[in-house]
Structures are given as C-alpha cells and as structure tokens.
Image (spheres, helix red, strand yellow):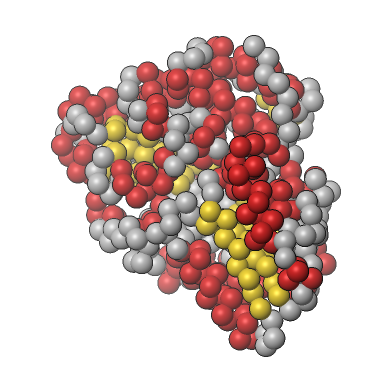
Amino acid sequence: MRRPKRSLAPLVLGAAALFAATTLTACGDDSGDDPDTLKVSFKQSTDKSIKVQDNFLASIKKQFEKENPGKKVELIPINAPDAEYYTKVQQMLRSAKTAPDLVYEDTFLINSDITSGYLTPLDPYLEKWKDWPQFIETAQAAAKAENGKTYGVPDGTDTRGLWYSKALFKKAGLPENWQPKNWDEILDAARTIKEKVPGVIPLNVYTGKPGGEQSTMQGFEMLLYGTGEDPLYDPAQKKWVQGGQGFKDALAFVETVYKEKLGPSVEDALDPNIGTRVRGELLPEEKLAINLDGSWLPQDWLEGSGHEWPTWSEELGLAYMPTQHGQAPGKVSMSGGWTWAIPDKAANKDLAFEFIKAMQTKENAQRWYIANSGIAVRKDVAGDPEYVKAQPGIKFFTDLVEFTHYRPAYPAYPQVSVAIQEAMESVTTGDASVDEAASAYDEELDSVTKGEVIKN
C-alpha cells in the first residue's frame, strides 16, 4: 500500500504540539533582542541523571562570561527523544521570537535545515578562525551544503560496533574475546545465549519509528553498509538506491532477531527510551548479552553520571561489526556526530561564534571528547597521548574510522530515514514480510525523493 507523502516537520506531530508552548516560553521573551545575552539551545539527555553536556556547557558559560565582562549566556536545554528534539528545534528556528543564537544540530538533519533557510553560513567566520584547519576534512564537510558553504562546527564524531557481556558469554560457553566474522556468527551467538542463559536479552538491534535515527543508523545502516558499496545513495549518479537484495538482507536480519525472540520484546524494542534503558540498566545489570551501538556509551558510566560503572571495561567486550559474509574490508561502521550552528534568525550571531570558539579550543575540545566518549575531530587532540589513554575503548573506536561510512546528508535523508524505520518496524512486528516491507520502502523512497531513484 502506498504511504502518503509527509514533510519533515511533522515527524512527531503529537510531540510538536505538546512542546510548542514550552518552546515559545523558553525563547520568546524580550531577551532575544538583548545584544549582551547569548541563548544556547542543546539536546539534554532523556536520562535526567546524565549531566555530561549540561556540566560541560555550564563550565564554558562560566569561562565565557568571565572572559567577556557584561555578556551573559542563557542555556536552553531541550529534554526530548531524538525525533521530538528535531521537531522542536525546527519550530524554534522559524521565528526570530523563538530562535536561539546557537543551536545543536545533528549532522543528519542539518542539510534539511539549511535548505529550509534556517541556518547562517559560517564561512566568513571560519576564514578568520585560526583553529579551523585543525579539524579533519571529513568533519569540516559534515555541515557543508550542496552550495559549498559550511553551516556548522562539529564537536566530535562517533563510530559503532558490538558491545557484549563477558559474564553472559562465559555462562553460555562463548569465548571472552569474541569477534564474529559475519552476520551468521552474530545470530549463532545470540541463539546460544538464548538457549544457555534464559531470562536475558541475547541481542539488541534498535528498530522502528519510535527510535528515530537511532534505529536507522545504529540498527539498519550498520547492516546495510555491510552488504555492498553505496547501498543507500549513489554519489556518481546523485540518486537514491531502491531496496535491492542488500536492503532485503538487512531487513531479514532484523526480522530474524525479533521473530526468533533473540531481541527485546517488541513492546520494549519500540519504546522510544530503549536506548536509555540499554545504557542505564540492561548492560550494567547483565540483562543484555550483545548490543549493536555507538562509541559514546561510556559517558553514561563515568563518575558523576548517575549510572557510575567504573569496571565496565573489564565486564564488557568490544567487537567490530563484520560485513555480511566477511567480504572485504571485513569491518563496517557508521559515523555521524553533532555540530553547533547559528540560526538565520539569531539575534547575536557574532557573539554566538565567539562562544563556538570558546568551546572548541584544543583544551576544551579535548575535555569534551573525553567527557562524552566522543571521537576527536581536531588533529591536535587526536594526536595527544593524553586523549588516547583517557578512557578504555577510545582507541578501538577511533581505529574504526578507517572503515566507517557517512550518511548521505542531503535534504531528503530525514524522510528516507523515516521510510527505513517504517520498513524495520513492519518486519519487527510481523505486519509485513521482507519483500512487502522493501516494496513499500521503494514506493515511499520514490515519493520523498521526487523520483530521484535508481534500482540496485
């Protein structure tokens, strides 16, 4: 059945309506015209005990206000799951009354906001900033539009892999130093855990619309990009790729996880807070054996996080995600990250860029990467021995950059991502077969990209 067209803004209409009033209250007062007050909007963790970014920004605020007498920084946290955050930010950016001076943008959404005219090109600022050449080329390109202009400054990147419980593997008779060579070995390990260690979740693969981009990127694309080169978008032809065999194979993997009850219950899997539960409960309490997830997880376990887990590196193992059949290059990862952008309707653009510069000094950037378990995008930080040894797992995930892929960050991508989530959800719940889900995806892809598609 052909799904109706949708615009990006109403991804979560109900959430948008609920949050609209608080958005206007947070940013709609007269201080928006105050040249001495800088409004900084950011995504706050849905787990209120996690204060990593809150604490970092508070420290920068204190430093900035001290170095700039008479200036004030107003931090505006937005506490919402990803999809709701994106919707709320877009509402804020539409009006000068509600737009902050600085906004935290996911790289997957930024081109959509650029196309909508919501953001300011930063090139005049970047040309005069001596630290900009320190940023690796791929990071500089993360917020570059098709017009060649740059609209955001990245504050790190990430990679993804497999996290597994050594204790549960031992109970199941699986090796402590586990490294699957292909997808079948992942599923076989999950089946063994289901048989030998009942009562735990063998394997978590994020899925469905409630998880938003978490489902698409940590879940589906970690599979899809292990099936072949450019499986989602063909850069040579500048067209989106219909759901071919690799797409169906990735859906089949998801279907297997939930049909064989190797993953969380469908109800739990479709809970928008499943990621918070995985980090705060399921992994630390040995309720989950294998988790396909990102490099940032340890930020939830650091001292002061509310979920302190100082021994996590002794209790969890790390394995790279293999390609489908172990074919070259053997490993697969996805990378994304977030950027700081200045809204087009911001009242204090110059002051906003000064705040970006304060956040992104070598010292402050390095402190942020370590605090949030991020992967450095500054060359001088990446080469600093103190960064490399600061936290277990940093080297493992940094080494995956060699094998990583980036999402096709074009304006249609957010809608393509939703179509992927719908396909995943339909095979997760059993409402559609793999072929039916792939066919529905093809129809939706044709719709949201206005026919700019090719067959795989």
Q: Is residue 123 above or below residue 297?
A: below
* Residue lying at 24% horizontally and 27% vertically, measured from the top left: 194
**Left or right: residue 125 compared with residue 441:** right
* Residue lying at 29% horizontally and 33% vertically, measured from the top left: 201
Q: Is residue 249 above or below residue 83?
A: above
Foreground residue among 175 and 408? 408
**Left or right: residue 395 compared with residue 343:** left
* Residue lying at 62% horizontally and 80% vertically, measured from the top left: 64
Residue 189's x, y, as percent?
28, 29
| Residue 151 visible | no
Residue 227's x, y, as percent?
53, 27
The quadrant where residue 410 appears: top right
Foreground residue among 207 and 36? 36
Residue 247's x, y, as percent?
56, 22
Q: Is residue 59 above or below residue 102?
A: below
| Residue 148 visible | yes
Foreground residue among 18 and 415? 18
Residue 178's x, y, as percent?
28, 39
Quarter of the image with the C terminus in it: top right
Foreground residue among 44 and 190? 44
Q: Is residue 254 above or below residue 365?
A: above
* Residue lying at 19% horizontally and 43% vertically, measured from the top left: 167
The quadrant where residue 293 appears: top left
Number of numbered discs overlaid on the protein picture = 0
Quarter of the image with the N terminus in it: top right
